[in-house]
Amino acid sequence: MQYRKMVGPFCRDCGVAAFREMTAETLVQGWWGLISFLIANPVTILANLVNRVRIGALAAPVPGSPALAAFPAKPLLRRWEILGLLVPLTPILLLLFA
C-alpha cells in the first residue's frame, strides 16, 4: 500500500489535471490487498472527490504567467481507468444475483 499526494500552488486547470491523473491511477492500482480493497481505496476515492470540490474553487490560470497551465485531459468517465470501478462492484453483484 502506498499513499501519494501532490502539493503545490495549483491553478484550477492544473488541479483538475492532477485530480484526474491521481484518481485514474487509484481506480486501477488501488484494489490490491485486503485492507486496500475494503478500506483504504474507497476512502481514498471519496477523499479525492472531496478535494475535487476544493479544486473547483481555485482561480483560473493567469494569462502570461511564467508557468503554463496543465491541460486537464479527458474526464474520468471517458478514460479506460473508470473500469477499475468494476473491481469492487463485481463481487458485490455476484453476491446479490448468485
Image (cartoon, rainbow, N blue to C red):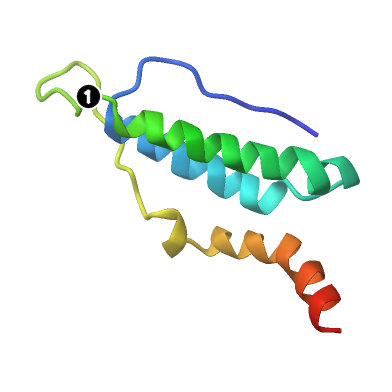
Residue at 86% x, 41% y: name it.
35
x then y, percent, for residue 28: 66, 53
Q: Crowding at label 1, few (<14), some or many (≥20) Cα neighbours within 10 Å?
A: few
| Quadrant including the N terminus | top right
Please name the residue shown 29% across and 31% down the image: 12
Residue at the spot 52% in from the left edge and 23% down from the top edge? 6
Q: As displayed, is residue 88 above or below residue 57?
A: below
The x, y position of residue 83, in whole percent, is: 60, 65
Helix, strand or loop status at disc 1 = loop
Task: State the image quarter where residue 45 is shown.
Answer: top right
Quickly name the residue at label 1: 59
Pick the residue in front: 68 or 12: 12
**On the picture, is 22 further left or further right than 16?**
right
Mark 1 residue type = Ala
* Left or right for 14, reference 94: left
Q: Is residue 60 above or below residue 43?
A: above
Give the total of numbered labels: 1
Residue lying at the far left of the rendered structure? 64
Q: Position of residue 27 (x, y in %)?
A: 63, 51
Q: Is residue 83 above or below residue 24?
A: below
The front one of 22 and 86 is 86
Vertically, is 84 above or below 61?
Answer: below
Q: Residue furthest bottom?
A: 98
Residue that appears at 39% across and 28% down? 54
Residue 88 lies, in percent from the top left, at 74, 60
Q: Quadrant of the C terminus?
A: bottom right
In the displayed orientation, state which residue is furthest to the right: 34
